[in-house]
Amino acid sequence: MAETSYWTGSEKYLCDPQLAQAFHMARTLGMPLLIEGEPGTGKTELPLHYAESKGLDLHVYPVGSKSNVEQFVARFDHVKYLRDSQIEILNAQREEKGLDSKLSTGGRNPELLADYVAKGPAAKAYGSPNSVLLIDEIDKAPREFPNDLLYALSHRKFIMPESGEEVSVSEQEMPTIVITSNREQELPTAFKGRCIYHYIHFPDKEVMQQIIEKHYPEVEEKVVKVALDVFYHLRRLGLERAPTTREILNWLKYVREASTEEAIRKIQGLEGIGALIKTQADMERVHRMLGSDPMQFSMN
């Protein structure tokens, strides 16, 4: 039976109560958890840390603009099947001529079509109930991709190409499935209906401080406070791309080896700003503001 204990986070992952409840409900009901929210709010990190903390197998499918169900579930290797079939014919001809040596198919048998099915992350996860499947950034996929998943999510089974082999699980044995979306495009209503839904809001200062403490407990509280002041000041500027959780963690990782005073100086002077700002227009805007009033980045 799949692992359904109530999970509230790990040593490195802060899981708020609402997310923990939605995650538990999804696993208890054997349904995928669809998490939406802006980039950098920890959507992808949830299944990664959950699998690591529980010692579970993890299967990841990073979605792209050309994603399709064949890549996600399984594909039939027609080239390898054709080659092995030709080898079988050649071996039969060699045997007729009295030759003992045979060409190898690598242990595959052309009469067994399942030997030529390469399983993708979905088929592997469905075949291993006590595992975790991450479908990352599904909003990047073509419109038909989430629609093509409806059958598998509703009936909890896949049919392997060519071989006709069925990979299925019961509701109780459904692997833990987490689907993330940055909302670059709206997902089909029918698809959302097959999922438990949760929206992760960007953490406030207090929660962000707790996240930082989980990752870098050795960083002085004064340094964290100054970094948070600057970070949230930048987020309030209306930049093209506001800095995210991942980026403040990278920034603190850069300054943490310095003394307290030196680290604060680096932060207030926006040293290493490339960890936070990701577009030329934003960079120029921040530098202009820093040049006109450097002290504003040390204010709440």
Image (spheres, rainbow, N blue to C red):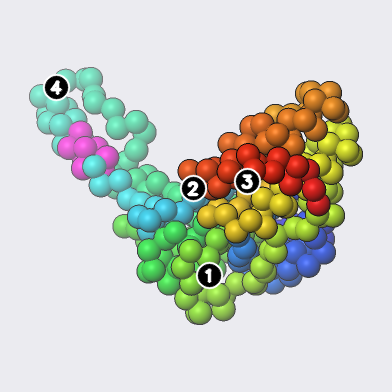
Residue 210 appearing in the image = yes
Q: Residue at x 66, y 31 (%)?
A: 271
Q: Which residue is mark 2?
A: 281
Q: Using the image, tell me which numbered label, if any, was put on residue 153.
A: 1
Q: Using the image, tell me which numbered label, if any, was put on residue 135.
A: none
Q: Which residue is mark 4?
A: 98
Q: Which amino acid, by three-letter code, is at mark 2?
A: Ala
Looking at marks 4 and 1 on the same chain, the residue that comes earlier in the sequence is marked by: 4
Q: Nearer the viewer, residue 209 or 194?
A: 209
Q: Which amino acid, by three-letter code, is at mark 3?
A: Met
Q: Which amino acid, by three-letter code, is at mark 4?
A: Gly
Mark 2 or 1: the one toward you:
2
Task: Count the labels in the image.
Answer: 4
Q: Which residues are magenta?
A: 80-87
The spot of residue 53 in percent (x, y) is 76, 44
Residue 18: quadrant of the picture: bottom right
Q: Tell me the CA gap for discs 2 and 3.
A: 13 Å
At mark 1, the secondary structure is helix
Q: Which amino acid, by three-letter code, is at mark 1?
A: Leu
Q: Tell me the CA gap for discs 4 and 1.
A: 54 Å
Q: Tell me the CA gap for discs 1 and 3.
A: 50 Å
Q: Is residue 19 above or below residue 110?
A: below
At mark 4, the secondary structure is loop
